[in-house]
Amino acid sequence: MATLEKAVVLHSRKYKESSLLLTLWLKDHGKLNAIARTNKKNHGIYQPFSLLNVDIKIMPSAESLASIRFAECEKSFSMGSYLSQLARMYLNEVLYWLLPHDHHDAALFDSYSLVIQELVSDDIARLLRYFELQLLESLGYGFQVDYDEQHNMMTENHYYAMAPLSAFYQTTAESGISGKYIKQLQQPVSSWDNDTLQVLQKLIRINLNACLQGRVLKTRELLISYLRNQNA
């Protein structure tokens, strides 16, 4: 009996008459591209925000397409508000562009599954920041909040700034961020108050934008536009 692997669909498009070209994220193998033959019975399986169990033939070369031999939907996370659906789409787009092929991190996969499941209401900010931090850490760009670039211990009484994907450096109150906020990066996102959330969101965005190398995310623009209209 074939061993089934857990997977989610990050992106899909029609390929020829009866197939889909998929970008999958497998818990045990990372991101890869695959071909799935479809028919009336299984076409609806390959939807975003669904946890799949797949029997997949992975080719030795990373440039070759994998082939899905069997797939079943274990769980679908399609419920939620319009804003929560936009947030899920945003996470998929971030992963599509930033996850290297064959970069497998089972803990990050589990974090994604948890966040997708929890995104049901308009309270999306903390869940998104939580996953963005997990993703940056997995990619090797987590925040160092114990010591600055001069190897001096960081404290809540000083102010700091940072270049993208770099260590913090000490600066003035006029141009920096208080260490009391930066130290909160060590604490659960659920414990951040609104002021901390707004400040640290800017730091997370700096590193994400650097990783994206100028690429504009369509779903981020949709999120910003929707929230701006809601607050107008």
Image: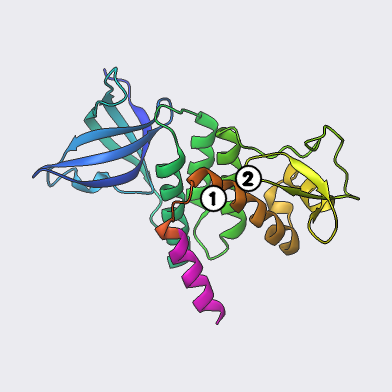
109 left or right of 130? Answer: left
Q: Quadrant of residue 231?
A: bottom right
Q: Earlier in the sequence, mark 2 or mark 1?
A: 2
132 left or right of 117? Answer: right
The quarter of the picture where the C terminus appears is: bottom right
Q: Where does the magenta region start and end? A: 220-232
SS for dot 2: loop
Mark 1 closeness class: few <14, some 14–19, many ≥20 residues within 10 Å: some
Amino acid on which disc 1 is placed: Asn
The x and y percentages for residue 165 are 63, 41
Residue found at the very far right of the displayed protein: 157
Q: Which residue is mark 2?
A: 164
The x and y percentages for residue 4 are 33, 26
* Residue sitting nearer the eye, 72 or 96: 96
Kindly identify which numbered label has been placed on residue 117. Answer: none
Q: Magenta part mainly helix, strand or loop?
A: helix
Question: Is any atom of residue 50 visible in this view?
Answer: yes
What residue appears at the point 59 percent right and 53 percent down from the top-left corner?
205
* Residue sitting nearer the eye, 44 or 95: 95
Q: Which residue is mark 1?
A: 209
Question: Is any atom of residue 81 visible in this view?
Answer: no
Residue found at the very far left of the displayed protein: 17
The quarter of the picture where the N terminus appears is: top left
Residue found at the very far bottom of the displayed protein: 232
Labelled pair 2, 1 in contact (Cβ < 8 Å): yes
Mark 2 closeness class: few <14, some 14–19, many ≥20 residues within 10 Å: some
Amino acid on which disc 2 is placed: Pro
| Magenta stretch encompasses residue 222 | yes
142 left or right of 12? Answer: right
